[in-house]
Amino acid sequence: MKKYFYPILMVAFIAVFAGCNPYNNEGEGAATGGALGALAGGIIGHQSHDTGAGVLIGGALGAATGAVVGSQIQKPVYAEPEPAPVVVAQTPPSTTYSGDTVTVNVPNSNGSYTAVVLKRSGNGYLGPQGEYYEQVPTTAQLQAMYGK
């Protein structure tokens, strides 16, 4: 038994370190199968009075079987999370013309808009509070009165 100890130990180390591949299960299966095969072969070989040969044969058969089984097992694939979609706030058109009315979107301090509807009156425009403008007022003019 003593003359087979170091070869068995070396086979065990090779089997363990050969199974350290993080990309597939074939190496891990070979290492596990080799170790279990060597153990079973050692027990069977000891019963037939040739422990060393049993360990070597069992280890080789176990490694081959473990490699085949391990190659059929899929490792989980970790995908990177999808980046969050970028939401771009669209500002409404500042002035919209429709028949005899003009709608001006006045920006508020909180990012929202107040729609101010102006009606055509003669050569100018009439505001919601009765104010008269000779031409379509700018958003800056309406912001003082209607902006929040």
Image: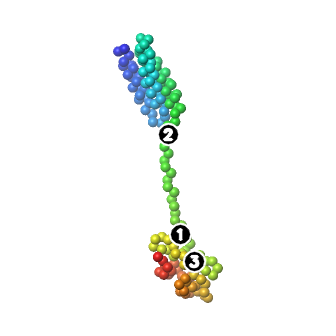
Amino acid found under the numbered disc labelled 2: Pro
| Residue in the picture at 59% in, 83% down | 119
Q: Which mark is residue 103?
A: 3
User: Are dots 2 and 1 in contact, CB under 8 Å?
Assistant: no
Q: Earlier in the sequence, mark 1 or mark 3?
A: 1
| Residue in the picture at 45% in, 22% down | 37
Visible in this render: residue 53? no
Q: Position of residue 59 (x, y in %)?
A: 45, 21
Q: Earlier in the sequence, mark 2 or mark 1?
A: 2
Question: Marks 1 and 3, how far apart in space?
Answer: 14 Å
> At numbered mark 3, what does the secondary structure look like: helix, strand or loop?
strand
Q: Estimate how packed mark 3 is, as few (under 14), some (14 to 19) or many (20 or more) residues with alpha carbons within 10 Å.
A: some
Q: Which mark is residue 91?
A: 1
Question: Marks 2 and 3, how far apart in space?
Answer: 58 Å
Amino acid found under the numbered disc labelled 1: Thr
> At numbered mark 1, what does the secondary structure look like: helix, strand or loop?
loop
Question: Marks 2 and 1, how far apart in space?
Answer: 45 Å
Residue underneath mark 2? 76
| Residue in the picture at 63% in, 81% down | 100
| Residue in the picture at 50% in, 74% down | 107
Q: Estimate how packed mark 2 is, as few (under 14), some (14 to 19) or many (20 or more) residues with alpha carbons within 10 Å.
A: few
Q: Quadrant of residue 116?
A: bottom right
